[in-house]
């Protein structure tokens, strides 16, 4: 029998036979899984860019007004169940890189770090550097902050500037005009109508506290919203609008590294459930190792708290509420959560809304 007449071994059998060796398995899993993850990330970037292009083109065809763009994003969120933050970022992403995303090796977390860079040429330069030098997103974010420092915009010694805390005082509320009478603004579009006797001596803009609100049972207001009974109003001296919209809160669920569902006590026993975004920071996207680590870190910290206090900011009528969150830990330590994430490397600064944009209407 000639050599050529021997039956040939199927190549797949040879490959499977080699898998008996762990070293072969390790190499092939590394090649298959990591290559696949890179390809998924490339597709994700492309999908987000194309989504942003669709949104931006639709807005352009409808006169390109910013208020219309916000309404479209919120409508898409309601109709498609896609978080408005993701939709808004896709539009910002495509606008920042209008031709196409420049690098095949950059992840969505890289591009999120680049979005706050307003100068187009600087943004492109940093993107090209990140790709050529194979920086991860944290290295890129650090370089962005170093660049700002070199231009004299940051204090010496700070590579990633911390958030200036906005700390209010729980239990303070503003008096507002309601048709021909007065009402108490509890925040989160919730109000208590005042009777004529309760309004005596008050005027629009006064800041008050509610006496006895925490000890009584709720009643139904004419709007159908449960509101607390209270013994009376106490005028406050020296309080300003910066002291308002501060509440005790309880954690319901961590969404990601910078977003949470919270139970917020407006004026006990009245409470609401609200989705809150940490002000002044941005955590990496879920689905990335950095994003998952940020969520785990945030969850771990919140699980060790004795009490949570939040101060809320509403930059405009379309945005979700932004929050400064203050924690009293079980060991007595006090933590400002926004900066705690920055200081531990699980977020970077992202000031789409500046302090000066604070709308005092909560």
Image: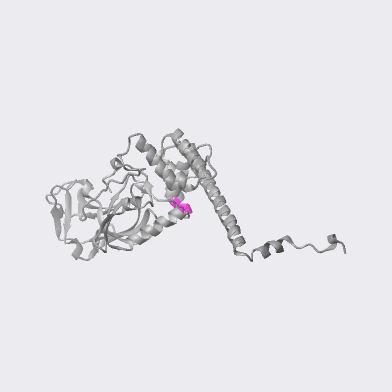
User: For the view shown, which residue lies furthest in the right direction?
Assistant: 1
Q: Where 311 falls versus 21 (above or below)? A: above
Residue ID at (20%, 56%): 171
From the top left corner, tell me how far across and down residue 35 is, in percent.
58, 52
Question: Residue 291: x percent and y percent?
Answer: 43, 54
Q: Is residue 81 part of the magenta span, yes or no?
A: yes
Q: Is residue 168 above or below residue 355?
A: below
Colour basis: one colour
Q: Nearer the viewer, residue 212 or 3?
A: 3
Query: Quick one: quadrant of the N terminus?
Result: bottom right
Horizontal arrangement in the rendering, residue 192 relative to residue 4 (left or right): left
Tell me the magenta residue range: 77-83
Question: Which of the two residues, 2 or 285, is positioned nearer the viewer here?
Answer: 2
Quadrant in the rendering for residue 229: bottom left
Looking at the image, can residue 87 be seen?
Answer: no
- Answer left or right for 313 relative to 203: right
Q: On the rendered structure, is 65 left or right of 262?
A: right
Does residue 247 appear left or right of residue 45 in this picture? left
Q: Residue at x 17, y 52 (%)?
A: 208
């Amino acid at each position: 029998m000639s050599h050529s007449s021997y039956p040939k071994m199927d190549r797949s059998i040879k490959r499977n036979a080699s898998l008996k060796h762990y070293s072969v398995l390790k190499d092939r899993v590394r090649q298959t899984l990591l290559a696949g993850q890179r390809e998924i990330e490339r597709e994700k970037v492309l999908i987000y860019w194309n989504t942003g292009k669709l949104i931006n083109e639709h807005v352009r065809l409808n006169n390109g007004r910013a208020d219309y763009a916000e309404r479209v994003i919120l409508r898409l969120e309601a109709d498609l169940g896609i978080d408005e933050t993701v939709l808004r970022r896709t539009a910002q992403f495509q606008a920042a890189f209008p031709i196409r995303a420049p690098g095949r090796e950059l992840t969505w977390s890289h591009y999120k770090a680049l979005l706050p860079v307003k100068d187009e040429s600087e943004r492109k330069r940093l993107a090209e550097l990140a790709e050529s030098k194979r920086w991860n997103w944290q290295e890129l974010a650090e370089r962005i902050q170093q660049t700002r420092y070199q231009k004299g915009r940051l204090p010496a010694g700070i590579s990633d500037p911390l958030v200036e805390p906005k700390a209010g005082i729980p239990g303070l509320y503003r008096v507002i005009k309601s048709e021909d009478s007065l009402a108490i603004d509890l925040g989160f579009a919730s109000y208590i109508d005042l009777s004529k006797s309760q309004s005596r001596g008050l005027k629009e803009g006064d800041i008050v506290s509610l006496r006895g609100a925490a000890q009584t049972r709720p009643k139904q207001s004419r709007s159908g919203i449960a509101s607390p009974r209270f013994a009376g109003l106490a005028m406050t001296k020296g309080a300003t609008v910066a002291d308002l919209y501060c509440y005790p809160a309880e954690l319901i669920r961590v969404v990601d590294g910078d977003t949470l569902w919270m139970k917020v006590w407006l004026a006990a026993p009245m409470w609401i459930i609200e989705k809150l975004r940490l002000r002044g920071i941005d955590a990496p996207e879920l689905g990335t190792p950095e994003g998952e680590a940020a969520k785990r870190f945030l969850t771990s910290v919140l699980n060790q708290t004795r009490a949570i206090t939040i101060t809320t900011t509403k930059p405009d009528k379309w945005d979700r509420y932004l929050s400064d969150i203050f924690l009293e830990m079980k060991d007595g330590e006090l933590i400002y959560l926004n900066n705690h994430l920055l200081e531990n490397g699980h977020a970077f600064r992202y000031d789409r809304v500046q302090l000066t944009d604070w709308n005092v209407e909560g």
